[in-house]
Amino acid sequence: MLDLIGVQETALSTSTVATVDGRTAVRVVEGRGLDVAIAEAVLEAGSFGDLATRSVQRHTDAGSMVATVLVEDGEGRRAVGSEVGDPASVYAVGRAALRAGEAATDLRG
């Protein structure tokens, strides 16, 4: 299991930086939105760069949040990851992306 060391958005939320097991990736937010950029950076840093991010959602309720990330590989197989966290934090989105990447790896065998 990989360890998500950190997820950070840069000044003005123009890019995000993710570090997984000592590997770092940077993604520019552009028009995709911060959560998608976070998911893509985590997937790349976690060596899941061949996966496409299909959906990133946040569901908030009573002061907590569930982040859900859906990814797809080149053969059309999809996997999902989710994480509960603080609505103000970007960390839960990063953990959800990492879980989705690990689930996709499990599907491949």
Image (cartoon, rainbow, N blue to C red):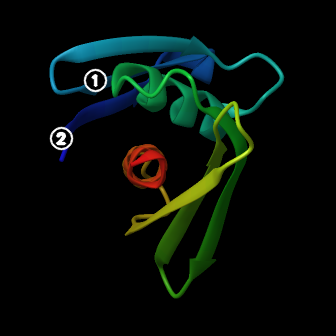
> Which amino acid is tagged 1?
Thr
Q: Earlier in the sequence, mark 1 or mark 2?
A: 2
> Which amino acid is tagged 2?
Asp
**Counting other residues with Cα less than 10 Å from the Cα at mark 1, is it few (<14), some (14-19), or many (20 or more)?**
many
Give me the disc on residue 79. none
Q: Where is residue 108 shown, x and y percent of the image?
A: 47, 46
Q: Residue furthest front?
A: 109
Q: Residue furthest right?
A: 31
Q: Nearer the viewer, residue 27 or 46?
A: 46
At 38% across and 53% down in the image, what residue appears?
A: 106
Q: Nearer the viewer, residue 104 or 43?
A: 104
Separation of marks 1 and 2 at Cα, in angstroms: 9 Å
Side of 84 relative to 34 (left or right): left
Q: Where is residue 77 shown, x and y percent of the image?
A: 66, 49
- Mark 1 sits on what residue? 19
- Mark 2 sits on what residue? 3
Side of 52 relative to 83 (left or right): right
**Mark 1, secondary structure of its residue:** strand
Q: Where is residue 59 shown, x and y percent of the image?
A: 64, 72
Q: Where is residue 28 shown, x and y percent of the image?
A: 63, 12
Q: Nearer the viewer, residue 49 or 22?
A: 49
**Can you say whether 23 is above or below 70 in the image?**
above
Q: Quadrant of residue 86 in the image?
A: bottom left
At 46% across and 30% down in the image, what residue appears?
A: 43
**Counting other residues with Cα less than 10 Å from the Cα at mark 2, is it few (<14), some (14-19), or many (20 or more)?**
few
**Can you say whether 55 is above or below 66 in the image?**
above
